[in-house]
Image: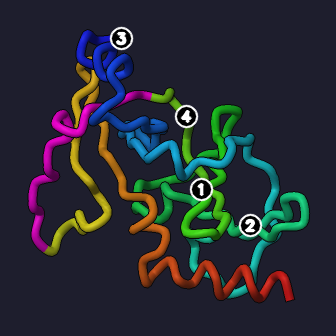
């Protein structure tokens, strides 16, 4: 662990903890406070006519949880499920949502000032859901505002399909 991270973890003041995960060759970070649990990828119940990124739903102790495949959502090419594929169960504004990722790396404490703003890409790439970029031990981590992403208009479909599966 780098000195900056150790110092950040020790002082705690202006740092946040992030769960880092991989999608393809990229590493992403989300606020650990949104993470409810991490579980292996299981079979899901498919929902007819749902967008490709909504893999389906699972029943988790009586709660119907929509499962979103982030690799499909971010257009990252072929999706291959293996022993490292996991589902991160999130609690976003009182809603429980599962997010399929290629793997979970670790939990890191990052000082706010180490997060640099994402460069503007214009209309080519939507950076609305990216809080910034942080370099951690020579790794570039893309910090995602998971609440903003999951509650966005195109994800609003999640509520619709989850409600349809429950009823």
Quarter of the rendering occupied by the N terminus: top left
Left or right, residue 65 beside residue 119: right
Which label belongs to residue 65?
2
Quadrant position of residue 10: top left
Which residue does the image show at 41% across and 55% down from the upper left? Answer: 76
83 or 151, nearer to the observer: 151
Question: In the image, residue 150 lies at what x, y percent?
Answer: 49, 69
- What separation in Å lies between label 3 and label 1 (alpha carbons)? 27 Å
Lower sequence index among marks 4 and 2: 2
Lower sequence index among marks 3 and 1: 3
Pointer 4: what residue?
104
Which residue does the image show at 22% across and 49% down from the upper left? Answer: 132
Left or right, residue 35 beside residue 165: left
Lower sequence index among marks 3 and 2: 3
Q: Residues within 10 Å of mark 1 (few under 14, many from 20)?
A: many
**Is residue 2 highlighted in magenta?**
no
Which label belongs to residue 99?
1
Quadrant position of residue 115: top left
Which residue does the image show at 37% across and 58% down from the upper left? Answer: 145
Lower sequence index among marks 3 and 4: 3
Pointer 3: what residue?
1
Task: Evaluate if marks 2 and 1 touch, with contact meaning CB atoms under 8 Å apart.
Answer: no
Lower sequence index among marks 2 and 1: 2
- What separation in Å lies between label 3 and label 2 (alpha carbons)? 35 Å
**Which residues are drawn in magenta?**
108-122
């Amino acid at each position: 662990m780098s000195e900056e991270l150790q110092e950040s973890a020790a002082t705690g003041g202006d740092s946040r903890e992030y769960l880092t995960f991989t999608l393809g060759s990229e590493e992403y970070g989300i606020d650990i406070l949104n993470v409810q649990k991490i579980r292996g990828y299981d079979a899901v119940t498919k929902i007819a006519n749902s967008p490709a990124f909504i893999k389906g739903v699972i029943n988790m102790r009586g709660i119907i949880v929509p499962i979103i495949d982030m690799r499909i959502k971010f257009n990252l090419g072929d999706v291959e499920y293996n022993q490292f594929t996991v589902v991160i169960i999130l609690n976003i504004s009182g809603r429980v949502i599962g997010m399929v990722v290629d793997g979970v790396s670790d939990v890191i404490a990052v000082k706010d000032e180490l997060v640099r703003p994402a460069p503007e890409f214009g209309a080519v790439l939507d950076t609305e859901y990216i809080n910034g970029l942080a370099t951690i031990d020579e790794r570039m981590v893309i910090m995602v505002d998971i609440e903003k992403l999951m509650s966005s208009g195109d994800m609003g479909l999640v509520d619709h399909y989850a409600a349809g599966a429950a009823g």
